Image (cartoon, rainbow, N blue to C red):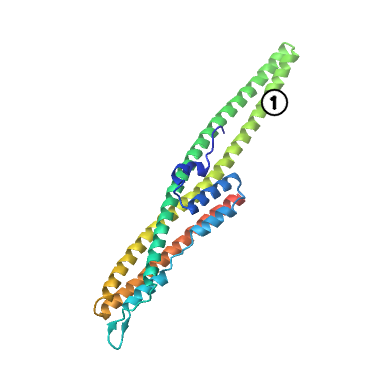
């Protein structure tokens, strides 16, 4: 196929360098390694496992919020002396959310560029398959049709040269048919590999969208709880309000758990697809 198959790094180069985070760059390079050799799966598998790890320390964050709601049973007043590192814990949680949002956003953008390129390559392969099929089939049919005509003329005119031409035409017809089948098999192999690579990027895109969605929800809930718990720590103790906030803190933990479960699901899908490229 007379077309240049651009690498993933080439496709995303203008958008990745030099601002992209290291993880996305490594993933793109690992995907290129897989395209060069279907057995080069280790680097990509490592990137996938790193990308889908849930590093949010939600329990620590929620504990810091709950400490604001702690009160003294003796005086029924809030205990305002909080551990010194609570503000640091909250800050780290928000910072990690920011990193995750950036990772998901950059991953989605990069994978979309690559996925679109794969779609274009698949379209090109489909066109080449059709052209080669028409060319080789037509050429083989012409040679097959010419061979008996030349052979008859050779007999009528008792010409050994024409007989040789007829034999060559028949042989060339067989050769063209075989060559056409070989070229189609090569294109089919490229097409199959591309479809598997495209499926990887599609799962990565969906995973990035899902991740960004949950990160957004988690951040909004966390900041709201941060604000409310801080206000309550400065006011008189209200048992009902405290219970309501504690319930919402539990819901935040569930959302973080849902986020982690989603990341695990997409990681499994991507890894299975990578394995298929190796065995297929």
Instruction: State whether residue 79 is above or below residue 51.
Output: below
Give the number of marks. Answer: 1
- In the rendering, at what x and y percent does residue 187 appear? 57, 38
Front position in the image: 79 or 123 = 79
- In the rendering, at what x and y percent does residue 257 appear? 42, 67
Instruction: State whether residue 44 is above or below residue 60.
Output: above
Front position in the image: 142 or 269 = 269
Which quadrant of the figure has residue 88?
A: bottom left
The residue lying at 70 percent from left, 18 percent from top is: 165
Q: Secondary structure at mark 1?
A: helix
Residue, disc 1: 171
The residue lying at 61 percent from left, 46 percent from top is: 37
- In the rendering, at what x and y percent does residue 93 appear? 40, 65
Front position in the image: 121 or 18 = 18
Quadrant where the N terminus is found in the figure: top right
Residue extending furthest toward the front: 84
């Amino acid at each position: 196929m007379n077309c240049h198959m651009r690498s993933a790094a080439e496709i995303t180069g203008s958008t990745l360098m030099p601002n992209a985070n290291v993880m996305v760059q490594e993933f793109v390079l690992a995907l290129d390694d897989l395209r060069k050799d279907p057995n080069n799966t280790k680097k990509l598998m490592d990137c996938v496992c790193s990308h889908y790890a849930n590093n949010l320390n939600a329990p620590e964050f929620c504990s810091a919020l709950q400490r604001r709601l702690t009160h003294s049973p003796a005086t029924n007043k809030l205990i305002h002396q909080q551990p010194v590192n609570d503000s640091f814990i909250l800050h780290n949680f928000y910072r990690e959310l920011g990193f995750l949002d950036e990772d998901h956003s950059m991953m989605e953008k990069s994978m979309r560029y690559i996925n679109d390129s794969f779609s274009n390559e698949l379209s090109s392969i489909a066109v080449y398959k059709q052209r080669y099929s028409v060319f080789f089939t037509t050429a083989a049919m012409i040679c097959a049709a010419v061979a008996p005509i030349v052979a008859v003329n050779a007999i009528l005119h008792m010409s050994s040269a024409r007989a040789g031409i007829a034999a060559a035409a028949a042989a060339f017809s067989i050769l063209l048919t075989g060559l056409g089948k070989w070229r189609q098999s090569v294109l089919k192999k490229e097409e199959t590999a591309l479809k598997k690579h495209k499926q990887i990027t599609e799962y990565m895109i969906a995973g990035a969208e899902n991740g960004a969605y949950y990160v957004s929800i988690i951040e909004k809930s966390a900041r709201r709880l941060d604000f409310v718990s801080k206000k309550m720590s400065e006011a008189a103790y209200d048992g009902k309000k405290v219970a309501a906030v504690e319930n919402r803190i539990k819901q935040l933990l569930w959302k973080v758990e849902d986020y982690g479960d989603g990341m695990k699901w997409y990681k499994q899908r991507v890894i299975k697809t990578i394995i298929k490229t190796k065995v297929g």
